Structures are given as C-alpha cells and as structure tokens.
Image: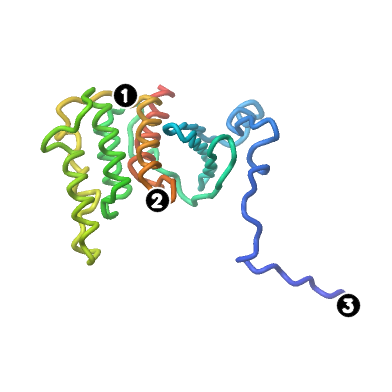
C-alpha cells in the first residue's frame, strides 16, 4: 500500500514570489496578458516622492496582487481576496475626485480615520481645487481633525469614521475635476508616505481614486 504524502500545513505554504508575477525583464503582466488574451485586470504603477517607492497593482478574478518596491528592489508582495474598489461603485464616465472620495465612504466607511487617510484626502482635495493649501472647513481639514482626535481616543466606537467625513465630499469641495492617472499617483503617494507600513488599504482613499482614474482612462 502506498503511503500518502503528508500535506504541508497551510501556514507553511510558499508566499507569492515576485518571479511568479513578473518575468526577468520586469515587463508588467498586464502587457503580456493583453497580448495573450489572458484574464482581465488593471495595472497601475506609482512612484511616490523622492524615495522611489513603486506600487504595481494587478486585478485578477476575485483578487488583486500588489507588488511594492523601493529603488527598483521588491520589498513586498501580497494578494487581496477582493478588489481594491468595486467597479460597480462607479458609473463609466468622467468620475470626479469628489465622487471617488464619496465611493470610499461606501467601501471603507466603517474605518476610523488615521493620518494616512487624512494625507490622501488632502492630496485629493489639492488636486481637485488646484490650491496649494487646504480649504478651511473642507473635507481635508475635517479629515485632519478626525485623525488627530482618533489618535487620542481609546474606544473604537468613539472614533470618527471615513464615512462621517467623505459621505458628502463633493459638496465640501469648492471645485472638482475628473480623476486622472496623475491625480491617482499623487493620492497613492500621500497615503503610502504617511502609513507606517508603506502600504495602501484595499477599498481606501487611494484605491478608490485609482479605480476612478482607470475607468476614466477606458472611456
């Protein structure tokens, strides 16, 4: 009788390797799949600030693979079981920055506002209004106040959530504009630089703005 090989515990499964996703020429899988009729996905690369932080995102059915690198060297890669922002949140067309922020209230409205959220919201507001400073009483000012207050609050139920700040973001912006890829890159960079783990959150501000930019590009 043949002896059945013991199965490797789930915790010991090998993580996704960079080589499994990108070939040695560092060509995005997005390009190869488009040529070969592979699964549908979106690819977004962002270089954040002077640190050369690059984020590559790839959508697969039911999950998203995100690769992070600094100075051309991969420092992390992980897979999320759900899309960063559901396409159904938006209608195809010229989605504005305010609408993208409001979409975050639907995808992550329960999340307490932190400093990375506030930074991403401020970056979005600056790009929407064209101003170099935040608008008094605007969505960015509200997010910064919420992040500061939440950092001092111990009870989770007492913290201000993203939904409280972003549910009427369009009305709080004195000006608005359709989201572009450059806008998405700026918001992603702001969220990354202010996150202690240098990551963006699925369904968060940067994710929603990036999804809106992709849809605007495909129009």
Residue in front for this viewpoint, 87 or 176: 176
Residue in front for this viewpoint, 186 or 128: 186
Task: Please tell me the numbered disc located at residue 1.
Answer: 3
Up/down of 157 relative to 103, above or below: below
Q: Earlier in the sequence, mark 2 or mark 3?
A: 3
Q: Taking 56 as reference, is 192 left or right?
A: left
Q: Which residue is mark 2?
A: 196
Label 2 packing within 10 angstroms: few (<14), some (14-19), many (20+):
few
Q: Earlier in the sequence, mark 1 or mark 2?
A: 1
Residue at the image position 58 percent from the left and 31 percent from the top: 30
Q: CA distance from mark 2 to mark 3?
A: 54 Å
Q: CA distance from mark 1 to mark 3?
A: 65 Å
Up/down of 114 relative to 23, above or below: below
The residue tagged with tag 3: helix, strand or loop? loop
Q: Which residue is mark 1?
A: 94
The residue tagged with tag 1: helix, strand or loop? loop
Q: CA distance from mark 1 to mark 2?
A: 33 Å
Instruction: Name the residue furthest front.
Output: 50
Task: Please tell me the numbered disc located at residue 141.
Answer: none
Where is residue 48 shown, x and y percent of the image?
Answer: 43, 34
**Nearer the observer, disc 2 or disc 3?**
2
Label 3 packing within 10 angstroms: few (<14), some (14-19), many (20+):
few
Q: Taking 208 as reference, is 36 left or right?
A: right
Q: How is the image coloured?
A: rainbow
Q: Quadrant of the C terminus?
A: top left
């Amino acid at each position: 009788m043949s002896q059945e090989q013991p199965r490797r515990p789930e915790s010991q499964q090998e993580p996704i390797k960079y080589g499994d996703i990108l070939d040695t020429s560092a060509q995005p899988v997005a390009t190869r799949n488009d040529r070969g009729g592979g699964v549908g996905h979106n690819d977004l690369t962002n270089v954040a600030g002077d640190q050369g932080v690059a984020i590559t995102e790839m959508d697969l059915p039911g999950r998203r693979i995100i690769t992070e690198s600094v100075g051309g060297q991969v420092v992390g890669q992980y897979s999320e079981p759900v899309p960063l922002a559901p396409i159904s949140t938006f209608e195809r067309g010229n989605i504005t920055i305010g609408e993208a922020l409001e979409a975050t209230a639907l995808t992550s409205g329960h999340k307490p506002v932190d400093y990375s959220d506030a930074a991403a919201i401020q970056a979005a507001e600056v790009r929407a209004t064209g101003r170099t400073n935040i608008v008094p009483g605007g969505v960015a000012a509200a997010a910064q106040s919420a992040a500061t207050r939440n950092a001092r609050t111990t009870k989770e139920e007492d913290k201000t959530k993203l939904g409280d700040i972003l549910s009427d973001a369009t009305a709080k912006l004195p000006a608005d504009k359709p989201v572009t890829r450059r806008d998405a890159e700026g918001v992603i960079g702001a969220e990354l630089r202010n996150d202690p783990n240098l990551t963006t959150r699925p369904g968060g501000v940067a994710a929603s703005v990036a999804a809106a930019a992709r849809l605007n590009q495909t129009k």
